[in-house]
Amino acid sequence: MRNLFYRTLGGLGVAVYLRHLVFGLIFPALLYYDHRNKIDQVTLQSYLLVIGNCVLYPYARFAYERVINFILGDNFFLVNAGLMLFTKLITMAICWTLAIFMAPIGLLFLFFLTDSDS
């Protein structure tokens, strides 16, 4: 069982997990800013969903990056920086919103990609 946790939850590495976690905290901040005057109307389920999305976002982002790397390979594109940042923000928002559904895919990737001998 310990091997299962190591190969999935510990497979990203602390630095990568924290980096994605910090970027994932952008969206709760935006939600708070949007609902700051209606904070008493927010339900417990909403808080749990936001916390779940934040915790699972790094694994969802990992799954997204693996799929995109598979599709694009080692190619790179020269585009306008503003367009690239906007695209990154949109993909981050999609990954954060769908983290509950995408994270299991990322955890499966990590399970099969992480060395089982460690």
Image: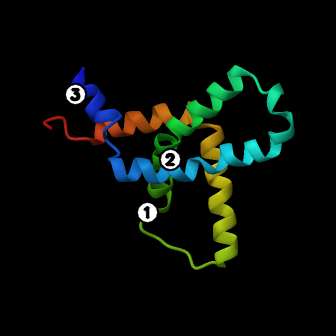
Task: Specify few, some or many for label 1: CA neighbours under 10 Å numbering under 14, 14-19, or 20 or more.
Answer: few
Please say if 65 is above or below 115.
Answer: below
- Mark 3 near mark 1, Cβ–Cβ under 8 Å? no
The front one of 43 and 11 is: 43
- Amino acid found under the numbered disc labelled 2: Leu
- Tag 2 and tag 3, C-beta contact below 8 Å: no
Q: In the shown orientation, is residue 76 left or right of residue 95?
A: left
What is the x, y in percent for residue 77? 55, 75
**Foreground tag (3 vs 1):** 3
Q: Residue at x 74, y 43 (%)?
A: 31
Name the secondary structure under disc 1.
loop
**Mark toward the start of the polypeptide (3 vs 1):** 3
**What residue is pinned by disc 2?**
21
Please state if 51 lies on the left or on the right of 67 as rendered. right
* Cα separation between marks 2 and 3: 23 Å
Q: Which mark is residue 73?
A: 1
Disc 3/disc 1 C-alpha distance (Å): 30 Å
**Location of residue 2 by image quarter:** top left
In what element is the residue under mark 3? helix
Q: Amino acid at mark 1?
A: Gly
Q: Which residue is mark 3?
A: 3
The residue lying at 42 percent from left, 68 percent from top is: 74
Secondary structure under tag 2 reads helix
